[in-house]
Image (tube, grey):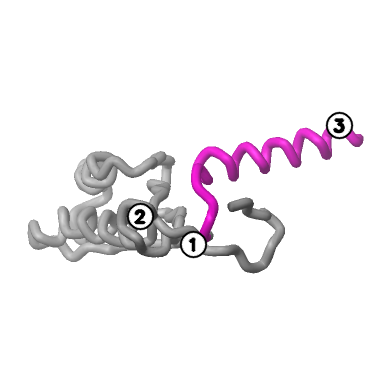
Amino acid sequence: MTFDRNAIKQEVPIDPKTGKPYLNTVAAIQIAPHGVGSELSGYVAEAVEVIRESGLPQSTNAVFTNVEGDLDEVLRVAGDAAKKLAEQGYRTSLVLHMDIRPGFTGQLIEKPKLVDEIIAAKQGEE
């Protein structure tokens, strides 16, 4: 199966392990408690630890933790990470932005690489 980055619609691959459509998803996840003071890092670290222990490819930056995997897995991990704080009794905020793109994997690495290549090519033209 060949995937075209510029195609509007892709053929949806089937996961050989589950027999279900594999809906690759890149998600930006932000989880934070409310009403706990001005420094949230300790609480955020608890949620990020859940994401990291999931085994899904992930990367944490100053605002979000980016995660990649099948849609169902990503939703489960986001929910589990939010529950880590909510089940302690904290009012918890979950911000979730997802790019669901069947057929593409490795996008946590490939997307930034593609952007860098485009910028480098543009600078080479100047």
**Figure check: 94 above or below 57:** below
Q: Are marks 2 and 3 in contact (CB under 8 Å)?
A: no
Q: Is residue 109 left or right of residue 52?
A: right
| Badge 1 amino acid | Ile
Residue marked by disc 2: 30
Task: Say whether residue 110 is left or right of residue 61.
Answer: right
Which region of the structure is painted magenta? 102-126
Residue type at mark 3: give it.
Answer: Gly
Gap in angstroms between the C-alphas marked 3 and 1: 32 Å
Which of the 4 image quarters holds residue 74?
bottom left
Q: Is residue 79 magenta?
A: no
Mark 3, secondary structure of its residue: helix
Residue 124's disc number = 3
Q: Disc 2 on helix, strand or loop?
A: strand
Residue indicated by mark 1: 100
**Is 120 drawn above or below residue 8 in the view shown?**
above
- Earlier in the chain: of badge 2 and badge 1, it is 2
Residue 65: in sight, yes or no? Answer: yes
Question: How far apart are labels 2 and 1 at the CA level?
Answer: 18 Å
